[in-house]
Image (cartoon, grey):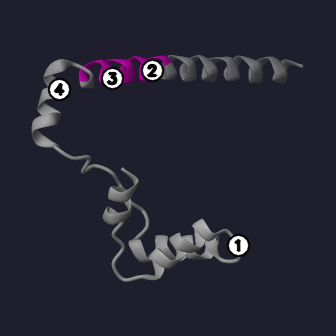
Amino acid sequence: LADLDSNCASKEAEYEVVKKTRAEETLAIAETIKILNDDDALDLFGKTLPSPSLLQVSHRDKEVRHLAMKALRGSHDNRLDFISLALRGKEVNFDKVLAMID
């Protein structure tokens, strides 16, 4: 029973450290968000990053096409057949189709 009391006391102390660390991290994240949402920061980001160039892409085009073809295989929907046909083609351009839709 004495061992249980000492274990509980040490766990309580560890938990207090974790709570304190979590509170500090939450405060730091809130301050960071405040700084990043500041008008000066937004202007600076707009000047330096005109496009979302920080976007990380994990798949290459070939891999994505292969996965899409695998997902489309076996479907009997004509609309999906059109997408499958476009994916198999070398150059996919939907400008004409979009112009006809508009």
Say what amino acid the circle numbered 1 marks: His
Q: Which of marks 1 and 3 is in front?
A: 1
Measured as percent of width and height from the top left, residue 74 is found at 71, 77
The answer to whether 15 appears left or right of 29 in the picture is: right
* Disc on the earlier residue, 1 or 4: 4
Measured as percent of width and height from the top left, residue 75 is found at 69, 72
Badge 4 is on which residue?
A: 41
* Disc on the earlier residue, 2 or 4: 2
* Disc on the earlier residue, 3 or 4: 3
Crowding near the residue tagged with mark 3, few <14, some 14–19, many ≥20 C-alpha atoms within 10 Å: few
Instruction: Tell me the CA gap for discs 2 and 4.
Output: 21 Å
Could you tell me what secondary structure mostly forms the magenta stretch? helix
Badge 3 is on which residue?
A: 33
Instruction: Tell me the CA gap for discs 3 and 4.
Output: 11 Å
The residue shown at (19%, 27%) is 42
Of helix, strand and loop, which one carries label 3? Answer: helix
Instruction: Tell me the CA gap for discs 1 and 3.
Output: 48 Å
Front-lying residue, 14 or 35: 35
Of helix, strand and loop, which one carries label 2? Answer: helix
Crowding near the residue tagged with mark 4, few <14, some 14–19, many ≥20 C-alpha atoms within 10 Å: few
Badge 1 is on which residue?
A: 76
The answer to whether 3 appears left or right of 100 in the picture is: right
Front-lying residue, 14 or 47: 47
The residue shown at (76%, 19%) is 8
Q: Nearer the viewer, mark 1 or mark 4?
A: 1
Residues marked 2 and 4 touching at CB (< 8 Å): no
Residues marked 3 and 4 touching at CB (< 8 Å): no
* Disc on the earlier residue, 1 or 3: 3
The residue shown at (48%, 22%) is 21
Badge 2 is on which residue?
A: 26
Say what amino acid the circle numbered 2 marks: Thr
Magenta range is: 23-35
